[in-house]
Image (cartoon, rainbow, N blue to C red):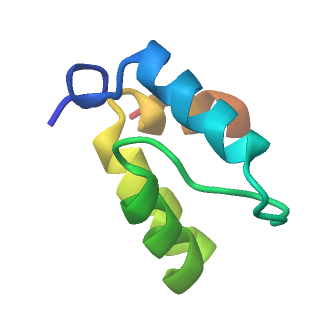
Amino acid sequence: MTFVADAMAPAEYARRIVAFAQSSKNVPWFWEGNFATATWFLTTFLSKKALEGIIGRAIKGMTEMETLIRGSTLS
């Protein structure tokens, strides 16, 4: 799965966000986009460590980035 290829078009995303913001719903946040439901589920029901593991595997280069941030050397 590629996130960019499966992403919602920016114009559609903007239309939905503006429509929600102008609605009478009074909530501190809202979820919108192609991966909103999956993201909500993961952030609600999984621990931070599990979520980082899933996202780290889904995004190429995250292991290398973590290594650079933590100051370790790659083996």
Res 16 visible? yes
- Does residue 50 lie above or below 63 as drawn? below
- Does residue 32 lie above or below 65 as drawn? below
The percent position of residue 42, horizontal first and vertical second, equals 46, 71
Q: Quadrant of residue 43?
A: bottom right
Describe residue 58's horizontal placement relative to residue 31 as left or right: left
Q: Who is closer to the viewer here, 61 or 34?
A: 34
Q: For the C terminus, which image quadrant?
A: top left
The percent position of residue 8, horizontal first and vertical second, equals 35, 28
Residue that extends furthest to the front in the rendered view of this protein? 24
Res 71 visible? no
Describe residue 30's horizontal placement relative to residue 57 as left or right: right
Q: For the N terminus, which image quadrant?
A: top left
- Does residue 17 lie above or below 50 as drawn? above
- Residue displayed at 51% across by 67% down: 40
- Residue displayed at 46% across by 16% down: 10
Q: Who is closer to the viewer here, 28 or 73?
A: 28
Residue that extends furthest to the bottom in the rendered view of this protein? 45
